[in-house]
């Protein structure tokens, strides 16, 4: 093997320019593979994070809907009949979750749960003079919201802690604040669905990156929202749950719906379109990256084919002096793998530095004020995949020329000369 490596080195150095071109091809492919995947997945994480970071893995709520069991269905007199009921109206279902405190305590004891927080969704009208602007106030537990749903990351002005420290305060969506021309410290007037008016002090701006949401949404503490609606301190309309494993969300949602007799929605169902978009973008990124590696492999294949054609004499002499076809195959396989290893290592290094460069490029947009530069994902998985594929493609590119070289008949070559 020592001699085989020495011969392979001599053949590589004899055609140094061609060897360098092949290694550069591998380097370029790996570099673009790493940079492309890092950028695309970083962008996916950013786009998905706009929704998924702010969405509970499982949401428990009470949906207003007609009763499934109408009185006529329960009557023994018409039990064996086909009953047709028209113009069925929603029942007197309550929006709030009954017994929310014990439910939250029970969920906290579940080992699958990372955290749980209460929430109140209150539809209101924001009064701008004689004009009423449709909107909603989300009553939240500020500490839980910041810990589980990254609430602080989306506040562009003010602090989330002001909601619990300042009485009757509100954080407005930036689009809504622009509509109302409301500055921090101003007082806005809201009207509830029951016709009650309430004054709230603006203590901050919230910007999710989705303009349509920022034009209607605002946030207040749970206590302020309960006071606004004239409800008791146990009034809760939603329970938000974050799981340790997001893949369990559909099963957990069904389980909790049965146990607590509430409606439940999992994150996969609520945001299926975002997951689909991310998967498609990832597939495109991997396809382009692998195509680059395959193209580099064809370049190595052509160079090794040319090398075999030019080194027929050397191969004939090797076989005439006792080297077997297997030995010759190993020599050219070592040549191919050497090109792959050297080109792959430089490709991984340059790919990392190119990713760092992209990460420093300013990226400023009004809809995402917290994002300053282009997003990059530095996952080690990309580097492992790039290194493995560089070895696989170069090995396959060298295997067929090496197999061809191992079958050369030295007698015919020497006789031809």
Image (cartoon, rainbow, N blue to C red):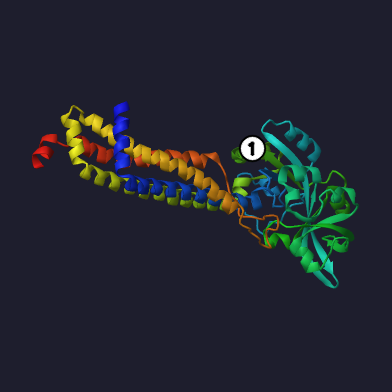
Label 1 environment density (alpha carbons within 10 Å; few <14, some 14–19, many ≥20): many
Residue 125 x/y as whole percent = 81, 64
Residue at image position (67%, 56%) is 372
| Residue 1 in sight in this render | no
Name the one closer to the observer, 244 or 397.
397
Residue 306 x/y as whole percent = 25, 47
Instruction: For the N terminus, give its image quadrant.
Output: top left
**Residue at the far bottom in the pictured view:** 130
Q: In the rendered view, does 143 fall on the left or right side of 185? A: left
Residue at image position (84%, 67%) is 127
Q: How many marks?
A: 1
- Identify residue for label 1: 252
Residue 244 x/y as whole percent = 65, 36
Residue 367 x/y as whole percent = 68, 61
Q: In the rendered view, does 9 fall on the left or right side of 314? A: right
Name the one closer to the observer, 406 or 183.
406
**Residue at the far left in the pictured view:** 415
Q: Residue 130, located in which quarter of the rendered image?
A: bottom right
Residue at image position (82%, 64%) is 126
Instruction: For the C terminus, give its image quadrant.
Output: top left
| Residue 227 in sight in this render | yes
Q: Helix, strand or loop at disc 1? A: helix
Q: In the rendered view, does 348 fall on the left or right side of 75? A: left
């Amino acid at each position: 093997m020592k001699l085989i490596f020495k011969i392979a080195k001599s053949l590589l150095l004899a055609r140094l320019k061609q060897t360098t071109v092949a290694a550069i091809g591998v380097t370029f492919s790996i570099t673009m593979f790493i940079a492309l995947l890092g950028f695309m997945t970083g962008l996916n994480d950013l786009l998905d994070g706009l929704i998924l970071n702010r969405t509970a893995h499982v949401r428990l709520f009470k949906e207003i809907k007609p009763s499934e069991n109408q009185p006529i269905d329960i009557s023994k007199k018409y039990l064996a009949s086909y009953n047709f009921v028209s113009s069925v109206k929603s029942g007197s279902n309550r929006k709030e979750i009954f017994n929310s405190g014990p439910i939250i305590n029970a969920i906290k004891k579940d080992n699958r749960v990372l955290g749980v927080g209460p929430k109140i969704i209150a539809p209101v009208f924001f009064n701008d003079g004689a004009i009423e602007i449709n909107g909603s106030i989300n009553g939240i537990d500020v500490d839980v919201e910041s810990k589980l749903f990254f609430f602080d990351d989306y506040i562009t002005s003010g602090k989330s802690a002001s909601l619990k420290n300042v009485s009757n305060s509100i954080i407005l969506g930036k689009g809504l604040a622009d509509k109302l021309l409301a500055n921090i410290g101003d007082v806005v007037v809201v009207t509830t669905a029951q016709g009650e008016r309430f004054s709230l002090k603006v203590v901050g701006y919230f910007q999710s990156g989705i303009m349509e949401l920022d034009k209607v949404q605002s946030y207040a503490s749970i206590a302020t929202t309960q006071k606004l609606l004239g409800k008791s301190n146990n009034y809760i309309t939603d329970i938000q749950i974050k799981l340790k494993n997001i893949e369990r969300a559909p099963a957990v949602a069904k389980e909790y719906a049965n146990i607590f007799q509430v409606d439940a929605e999992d994150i996969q169902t609520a945001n299926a379109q975002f997951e689909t978009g991310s998967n498609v973008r990832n597939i495109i990124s991997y396809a382009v990256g692998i195509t680059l590696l395959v193209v580099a492999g064809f370049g190595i294949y052509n160079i090794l084919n040319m090398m075999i054609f030019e080194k027929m004499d050397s191969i004939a002499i090797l076989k005439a002096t006792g080297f077997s076809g297997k030995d010759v195959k190993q020599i050219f396989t070592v040549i191919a793998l050497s090109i792959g290893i050297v080109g792959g290592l430089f490709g991984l290094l340059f790919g990392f530095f190119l990713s760092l460069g992209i990460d420093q490029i300013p990226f400023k947009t009004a809809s995402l004020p917290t994002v300053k530069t282009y997003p990059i994902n530095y996952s080690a998985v990309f580097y492992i995949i790039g290194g493995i594929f560089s070895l696989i493609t170069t090995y396959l590119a060298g295997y067929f020329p090496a197999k061809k070289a191992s079958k050369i008949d030295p007698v015919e070559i020497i006789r031809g000369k």
